[in-house]
Image: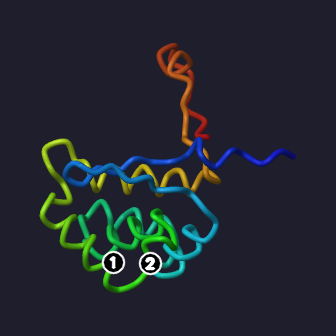
């Protein structure tokens, strides 16, 4: 069995003029899942625009370089100023995408759109 390249599941997050990379790791998976009672629960909270869940996702994805309460507050202020659901749904959408990547073992979820267009049933991942 080969390991996926984790960089293939990276998710970009833009705050103001800065772009950050949320990297899928087992540590991020465990951190988010443990705090929210599973990734599905975290996804639901993100969909409800729960700032704490969004911040947990952002900070876990950024990794240990950005750890600590001071950095978290700094990012929370930036997320708040940007708005969690701006006109494009940016921050919440990026967090939702990141959770899906974590659920899929660090890989992007892909669907064969040709099969779906042909009326073939969606079999999931």
Q: Pinpoint residue 51: horizontal percent, then vertical percent.
A: 25, 72
> Which residue of the protein is positioned furthest toward the bottom in this rendering?
69
Q: Are marks 1 and 2 in contact (CB under 8 Å)?
A: yes
Q: Is residue 28 left or right of residue 13?
A: right
Up/down of 9 relative to 110, above or below: below
Q: Residue at horizontal 68%, vertical 44%?
A: 5
Q: Pinpoint residue 48: horizontal percent, then vertical percent.
A: 25, 64
- Tag count in the figure? 2
Tell me the tag on residue 37.
none
Give the SS element for disc 2. Answer: loop
Front-lying residue, 21 or 44: 21
Q: How is the image coloured?
A: rainbow
Which picture quadrant has residue 80? bottom left
Q: Residue at horizontal 42%, vertical 49%?
A: 97
Give the SS element for disc 1. Answer: helix
Q: Which residue is mark 2?
A: 67
Q: Residue at horizontal 60%, vertical 71%?
A: 27
Q: Which residue is mark 1?
A: 71
Which picture quadrant has residue 44? bottom left
């Amino acid at each position: 069995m080969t390991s996926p390249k984790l960089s293939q599941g990276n998710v970009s997050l833009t705050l103001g003029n800065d772009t950050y990379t949320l990297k899928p790791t087992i540590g991020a998976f465990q951190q988010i899942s443990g705090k929210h009672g599973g990734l599905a629960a975290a996804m639901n909270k993100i969909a409800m625009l729960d700032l704490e869940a969004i911040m947990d996702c952002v900070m876990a994805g950024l990794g240990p370089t950005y750890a600590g309460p001071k950095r978290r507050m700094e990012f929370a202020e930036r997320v708040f100023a940007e708005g969690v659901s701006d006109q494009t749904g940016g921050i919440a959408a990026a967090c939702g995408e990141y959770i899906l990547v974590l659920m899929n073992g660090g890989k992007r979820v892909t669907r064969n759109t040709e099969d779906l267009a042909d009326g073939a049933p969606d079999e999931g991942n």
